[in-house]
Image: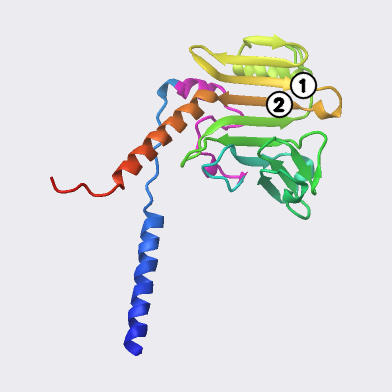
Amino acid sequence: MRQACLVLALLSIATIATADHHAGGAAKMTPGTYPERAAPWKRFTVKDLQLGSEIDKIPGFTCDAKVGGYRHTCVRFLDEKCKGRKTYVKSISFSSDVPPGQGCTYDSSTGGTYLDRKPTTTPLQGLALVGTDTDVPRAYEIRYIFAKDVVSADSNIGKAMIAKYGKPDFVNEPIQMRWNTPGIDDLFLVLECGGTQGPTGDYCLIQVYDGPLLDSERSIKQDFEAKKTLSIGPAAPKL
């Protein structure tokens, strides 16, 4: 009996060690390198945040649990209402999904916000980083929500944007300015204020977006998964 217990104990230790080895040694895809994007990513920096960054490594942000999932998001609220309140980031489908108690919640699916479980008419001010749905989530979208202003070359926000990013490629006063990247489609920065009528549009949004980065990282992940599947296949027969 004693010998049987010893055998079982040894088997348990071996099983745990094997599980730990596989969990700790699981291979991950290597993200791509994009030297052609370095300049526009640097140009479109918002509050020291850049596209292409690994979003889970940026200090001061709270992230949802969807690492590797669609629209994995990290958030830092800047709104005065959120001082002293806990930050939550979740994909919310039902009111029961909103965390209980006092707190500022960001819905990673829609960009909507909640204050103490109640949806806010105007989004809470803050920063959101959306990462690629890959093993190493990299920022392909930056969203900065702040107080409403008028979009024009003479407004405070207009002057600040032009001073930092240069002359916009498209202007739709008093709502929008946009900066594009020559030679790279769908890599842009846009400023939009009061996009909808009434209280729901009573804010400004700076959005920086790189759609091709998301596509490229997804392609790398698909290739990696395909090669991994081949490598763990059955041993070849003797020929």
> Badges 1 and 2: C-beta atoms under 8 Å apart?
yes
Q: Please state if 51 lies on the left or on the right of 91 as rendered.
A: left
| Picture coordinates of residue 119, whole percent (x, y) | 80, 41
Q: Is residue 55 above or below residue 232?
A: above
Determine whether the residue tagged by mark 2 lies in a helix, strand or loop: strand
| Picture coordinates of residue 204, whole percent (x, y) | 74, 26
Answer few, some or many: residues within 10 Å of disc 1's Cα (few below 14, many 20 plus, some between 14 and 19).
Answer: some
Determine whether the residue tagged by mark 1 lies in a helix, strand or loop: loop
| Picture coordinates of residue 236, whole percent (x, y) | 21, 47
- Give, as a single range, the part of the protein colored magenta: 37-62
- Asked whether residue 85 is in view, the answer is no
* Real-space CA distance between mark 1 and mark 2, rounded to the nearest whole angstrom: 9 Å
Q: Please state if 122 lies on the left or on the right of 126 as rendered.
A: right
Q: Which residue is mark 1?
A: 195
Q: Is residue 207 magenta?
A: no
In the image, what residue occupies the spot 36% across and 66% down? 17
Report the number of discs.
2
Q: Earlier in the sequence, mark 1 or mark 2?
A: 1
Query: Mark 2 belongs to which amino acid?
Result: Leu
Query: Mark 1 belongs to which amino acid?
Result: Gly
Q: Please state if 214 lies on the left or on the right of 76 as rendered.
A: left
In the image, what residue occupies the spot 43% across and 30% down? 219
Q: Is residue 39 magenta?
A: yes
The image's mark for residue 205 is 2
